[in-house]
Amino acid sequence: MPKKLSFTVKLSLWAAITWFGARIYGFRLESLAPFAVWICGTWLSYFILILAWRILGRKWFSPLKDLPGPKVCSPRGFTRTFGNIIFQNASAIFDEPLGTQITNWVNSIPNEGLLHFHGFMGTEYLVATSVESLSDVLTNRSYQFQKTSGLRRYAERFFGRGIVIQEGDEHKKNRKSFVQVFNQRQVDKLKPILSSKATQIVQHLSKKCVRDNEKTEKLATIRVNEFAKLISFDVMGIIALGMDFNSILDQNLEIFDLFQTLFASDSLKKSHFMWHNCAPPWLVTMFPSDIDRQMEFAHEQLRKSLQQMIPEKLASLKSTDLSEEDILTQIACSGSFTHEEIIPQIVTTLAAGYESTASSLSWTLCCLADSPETQVNLRQELLEAKGAKDALDEEDYERLPLLNGVCNEASRLYPTFAMTLRKAICDTYISGRLVPAGTYIAIVPRAINRAHHLWGPDAEQFVPERWIDRSKPEAPKFNATGGASSPICMLSFLYGPRSCVGRSLALAEIRRVTARIVESFHIQKSGTSIPQPTGWLSSGPPPDLDLLFSLVE
Ligand code: HEM
């Protein structure tokens, strides 16, 4: 079967079908109604032929058809047979919570590193499930797999052309500059700023506890995801732009709302993205929705502010001799980008870091609320490390085994980017298997992070201990792979040349805020269990989830 029908072949096919349609329906017609029947009939024939070609052709002739995979699951609300033929397992791609079906397949279908399934109109998907297949997609041949055109179009329209959606040589070149901006020395310089922000958060929470409940227990109900977003917004302001928005103190909330409009990933955004992904671009442009307008407005406002800030930053730098640590300054001074290129890079970085860090922090606090024993042990670890000091040293946060275990385990169980898709741009190989160009590869951090064959039978439970090496009981230390055979088994930040450049920074922030909160508060659930993740691209706890914070005496 040919890999791709060229445009000329498609056009000839279309012309032939139209001609046949005309022969069948058209030549005997005299009025307008039959003419409409002719048009519809022609297109229906065309549609059925393409459908049969795409669905049955791919099913019968696919070189991947012998790979194990799931049976077709019936999409809800559609007549079984018709729905099955058209949609097949497409619901696995837009699942809620994202990646749940694929996680079940990975844990229930025996395979040797690759699962295979068909999606909408017979589109072929592979799921990489072993260290070898993941290494091929994410490191060895990473530039042969690109992000989907739907995602790139969407991100470019609303965030601009930043590193997250760049491919090939353009990505390689810009990645080098980003790696320099986010290097360890740079992150180390930002750590004291993160610590002082964490202190401010705790002071604010303490006041809230007293304010909310003066008479009885000092208890406050915190809408955890909302709260984490304010923290993340303030921290992104500091690290990306060099300014503290102080939204945690109710300042600059109008800029926070712009961030929310642009970057928040809720269920409305999911349908918005699905529409942008599935409908032809001209149709999307022709019928702009309210969300389109709001996001474009927010993007424009952010762009204008950045446009104003860049020359000011560069001018102030001449006098301060490059002492500022924020990403905007660093990118502006790297000399790798023009003024116009800096803006989309910054907006994309904000998009990549804002919601993801907020969700990871929320999940860490939720997991601790669900595991009171871990909370007590962690408080103990923090108290012992602090000893007679006023506060932990910066190195303590990176060293303490349970603190690191808790943060890594929460982010393993609840990866904020639960699934991402790639498309093979040429014929290539994964685990020695030929993969034809055009095949989609589902990289599913939720499934890999919870895979029993990689993490053991307790893969779906919260076990911070797996990250602690107790081979020397008197000196337990952090185990960077969590007991898995390779670091690639923990995919929350992905792996290889397209992995998260902000990983160290995000973890440094989460550690500091978590440690300061656990030192000062007991965290309790308000319901009976931890809820399921919600959201489109990044999955966080439901927006209305409350946690109860009470002051530690
Ligand atoms: C816990 C928080 C975070 C998580 C879970 C996370 C996760 C990820 C993941 C999974 C990717 C790869 C996306 C893909 O290719 O499909 C990514 C890319 C990226 N992240 Fe993060 N991220 C976090 C925080 C941050 C922060 C704080 C920043 C910056 C301040 C940041 C900047 C970036 C950038 C620039 C990329 C694009 C890298 C590239 O394409 O080469 N991230 N992140």
Image (spheres, rainbow, N blue to C red):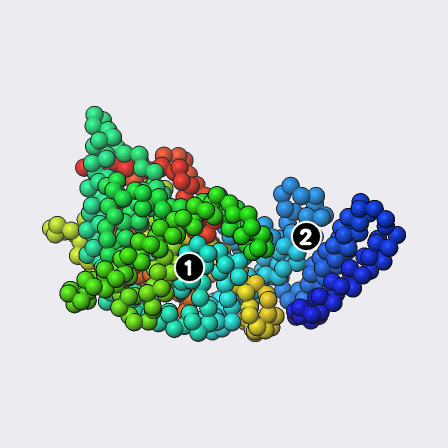
Q: Amino acid at mark 1?
A: Gly
Q: Position of residue 65 (x, y in %)?
A: 66, 64
Relative side of 158 to 329, left or right: right
Q: Secondary structure at mark 2?
A: helix
> Image point 23% across, 61% down: which residue?
313
Displayed quadrant of residue 336 = bottom left
**Foreground pick, 434 / 398:** 434
Residue 429 visible in this rendered orientation of the protein: yes
Residue 145, numbered circle? none
Name the residue tied to disc 2. 86
**Foreground pick, 327 / 461:** 327
Where is 470 relative to 382, above or below?
below
Q: Position of residue 32 (x, y in %)?
A: 80, 46
Name the residue tied to disc 1. 160
Q: Position of residue 45 (x, y in %)?
A: 77, 55
> Image point 36% across, 62% down: which residue?
345
Where is 95 relative to 9, above or below?
above
Packing grade of label 1 (10 A; few <14, some 14-19, many >=20) is many
Q: Residue furthest right?
A: 28
> Image point 67% across, 70% down: which residue?
6
- Quarter of the rendered image showing ligand 1: bottom left
Q: Residue furthest top?
A: 215
Separation (CA) of disc 2 from disc 1: 34 Å
Q: Amino acid at mark 2?
A: Ile
Q: Secondary structure at mark 1?
A: loop
Relative side of 443 to 349, left or right: right
User: For disc 2, does the CB lie below 8 Å from ligand 1?
Assistant: no
Quadrant into which the C terminus falls: top left
